[in-house]
Structure formats: C-alpha cells, structure tokens
Amino acid sequence: MAERDLTVTGHLDELRRRIIIALAALIGAAVLCLPLSSAILYALKLPARGGIERLVYFSPEEALLIYMRVSIIAGIVISFPVLAYQAWAFAAPALGKEFKRYTVYFVCVSALAFAAGCAFAYFALIPAALSFLLTIGRDELEPVISATRYISFVTGFILACGAVFEMPVAAYFLGRTGIISSGLMRRKFKYAFVVILIAAAVITPTGDAFNMMMLALPMLALYELSIWVVFFASKGRAGDVK
C-alpha cells in the first residue's frame, strides 16, 4: 500500500512538474508576442477583409485585454511543440519502453498537425463562415462588431481546428497499443458521427448550423483518415478491416 501511495504521489509530482514547465513555456511565448500583438490583431482581421470596416470596444480596459488575449493565443500556437512534448513525456512511460523512440516523431507530427489545423481554419473555414454570416441582413443592418466577440470567434475556430487535427495522431498511438482497431472504428462510425456533430456544435463559437457543419465535415474526414491510420499502425491485426 505504501509503495502504491508513493507511486501515485510520484505521478502527481511528475504531472505538476510537467504542467509548470508547459505554463512557463506558454507564458514566455505570450510575453514575447505581446509587443507584436498589434500585428497579430491585424492578421486576425484579414479573413474578414471587405466585410468588417473596423472593430470596436466598449470599456476602457477592453483594448488592453484584447491585446493580451491575442498574445496568449499566439503563445499557445508558438509553444505548442513544448506543450506536446510535456504531454508525451508524462504519458509515454505508461505506453511502454518501445514508445520512447517515438518522442521526436510525436512532437514533430503533433506540431505539424496542429499548425495544419490552425491554417485550415484561418485560410478556409473562417473566411467562408464570415462571408456567409456577414451577408445576412446586410441590406437592412450594418455590422458593428465587438473586438472581443470577433477575436473569440476567430481564435475559437483556430484553436478548435488545431485540436481536431490531432485526431489521426492520437489514433495512431491508440492503434499501436491495441486500445482501438480500425474495424471497431468502422463499426462505430454512426456513433462517432453523432458525437462529432455534438462536438462541432459545442466547439463552434457561434453555435449556428452553418458553422457547425463547416467544422463537422473536416472532423468526419479526419475520422475516416484515422481509421486508415489505425489500420496501418496496427499492421493488420485481427479485428482490423479496410
């Protein structure tokens, strides 16, 4: 019992250490991004090019909070490799010694997948969503967009897509450990479809059906990709089907 308690305590200490390192990396990256917050804000406004003339704020401190928020979001993106490494370093011992050699691959692929998701949101989803939403009632209504609401909308999409694009990476390691199989994922597709629709509705900043489907469709494509990733990762074990 004492050994078990010590093991649990050791795991908690390790988790605390990893969280502290991850937070330090995030805060450091956010501080470095703070002088560039104006340029980052300008970049976040580009997907609405032509649809929004300007953003407004409604309280004295709101502008400062907006610049801090965009710096933190940029810090998350920049420090993601460190965050991914800390998560892997904590979880890898539980997966077995053979997975230690995958550390570099995991960090690099996770960072690339996250960056791809962020880019997909920035260049594809957000412009399409804004183009659709800002044309509704344009003849009778003039958009006066809160900067806080707009930044929440854009960064919510970016971070959500970045996280969603990690699905094949997670599926690979779950397939290698035998926790899931491609056959199981194929048989549970109808349940996954419902879960994806619910997740898209929760993640979507506005909650409307159009933007929900804009996020749900890539998630469904990534689920299908994950099935194939698991199939190849598990090397055709029993229970894996095409």
Image (cartoon, rainbow, N blue to C red):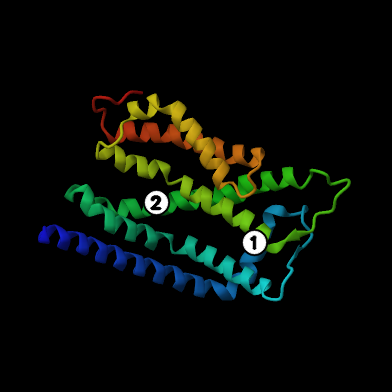
Please report whichever mark, 1 or 2, sits nearer to the chain's N-terminal start.
Answer: 1
Q: Is residue 34 above or below residue 96?
A: below
Asked if residue 240 lies left or right of residue 208, the reply is left
Q: Position of residue 160 (x, y in %)?
A: 52, 50
Mark 2 lies on a secondary structure that is: helix
Q: 231 or 156, which is in the foreground?
A: 156
10 Å crowding of disc 1: few (<14), some (14-19), many (20+):
few
Q: Is residue 121 above or below residue 77?
A: above
Residue bearing mark 1: 43
| Number of numbered markers | 2
Which residue, as the protein is rendered here, is positioned at the far right? 140
Q: Position of residue 164 (x, y in %)?
A: 47, 45
Kind of residue at badge 1: Ala
Q: Is residue 158 above or below residue 222?
A: below
Residue drawn at point x = 23 percent, y = 61 percent? 11
The label shown at residue 110 is 2
Q: Is residue 59 visible?
A: yes
Kind of residue at badge 2: Ser
